[in-house]
Each structure stands twice: as structure tokens, then as C-alpha cells.
Image (tube, grey):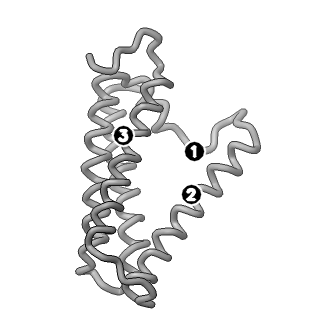
Amino acid sequence: MQSTKLLICLFVRSVVWLAIMGYLLFLPANNWQWIQAWAFLAIFAVGSIAFSAWLWRRDPDLLATRLGPLMQHGQPLWDRIFLLTFVFIWCGWLVLMALDAEAWYTSNMPPLLNVIGGLSVIAGFAATLFVFRENSCKTAFNFFH
């Protein structure tokens, strides 16, 4: 994928996904001032920017591959089912998180658990980074250089 086209695709997809996540969090919560949701989106935005910059610099071919369509020609059926199921569960989780925290008030999270949750999201980005490093399009890939 051409460099400029890759950047545009990356920007558009990132903005769209963050907007969808924001919609799934704030609409059911009916509270645009929900601090934890803003923190969650900020962590995802910063993590996505850092992650994309790392891939852009280290392995633009892998970044281009990852920006391809979710469903691809020749993709095994089990993989399609898994991906669609994961996307559905992810979106449902965001809605349930919003309803639980801001509409139903069924759980009262201590601030420490909010921090641990945020750190867990960051750890998830780090784990994904290691997976991408191992699945690099480059055969002689050096993580640190």
C-alpha cells in the first residue's frame, strides 16, 4: 500500500473505531461527562497512535496487511466466525460496561480497580505488540532497532 494511502487509511479507521467505541459507551450511559469512558478512549487513542507509529516505522507491510478487510477471500470459515463473534462481544461489552456503570449502577468500582483496568488495557497493547513482532512481514526483524 502506498505510503500516503496507508496513512489516510490508518487515520480514517482509527477515527471511525474510536467514534464507534465512544458511541457504544456514551449513548447507553447517557452521560457525556463519564470520566472512566473518556480515560478508556484516551488510553485506546494513545495506544493506537503509539502502536501504529511503531508498526509504521518497523514494518509498514504488516501495518498495511492489518489495515486490510476483516473478512478476506480464502479465509477459513472458523476464522470468520471467530472474528465476527469477537467484534460482537467487544461491542456488547462496551454497551454493558456503560449500562452497568452509568445506568444500572450495579457495581461500584473503587478507583484502584479503575487504574488496574486501565493498566490492563495498556498491557493488552504490549502483548499485541509482541504478537505483531512475531508475525512480522519482515523475516530479519529486530524488535529494538
Q: Which residue is mark 1?
A: 70
- Mark 1 vs 3, N-terminal side: 1
SS at mark 3?
helix
Instruction: Answer with left or right where residue 100 lies relative to residue 118.
Output: right
Q: Which mark is residue 87?
A: 2
- Counting from the top left corner in percent of width and height, residue 25 is at 39, 73
**Front: mark 3 or 2:** 3
The amino acid type of the residue labelled 1 equals Leu
Q: Which residue is mark 3?
A: 126
Q: Residue at x 39, y 82 (%)?
A: 101
**Front: mark 1 or 3:** 3
- Counting from the top left corner in percent of width and height, residue 113 is at 33, 68
| Quarter assignment of residue 44 | bottom left
The amino acid type of the residue labelled 3 equals Ala
The amino acid type of the residue labelled 2 equals Val
Q: Residue at x 50, y 76 (%)?
A: 96
Q: Is residue 66 above or below residue 27?
A: above
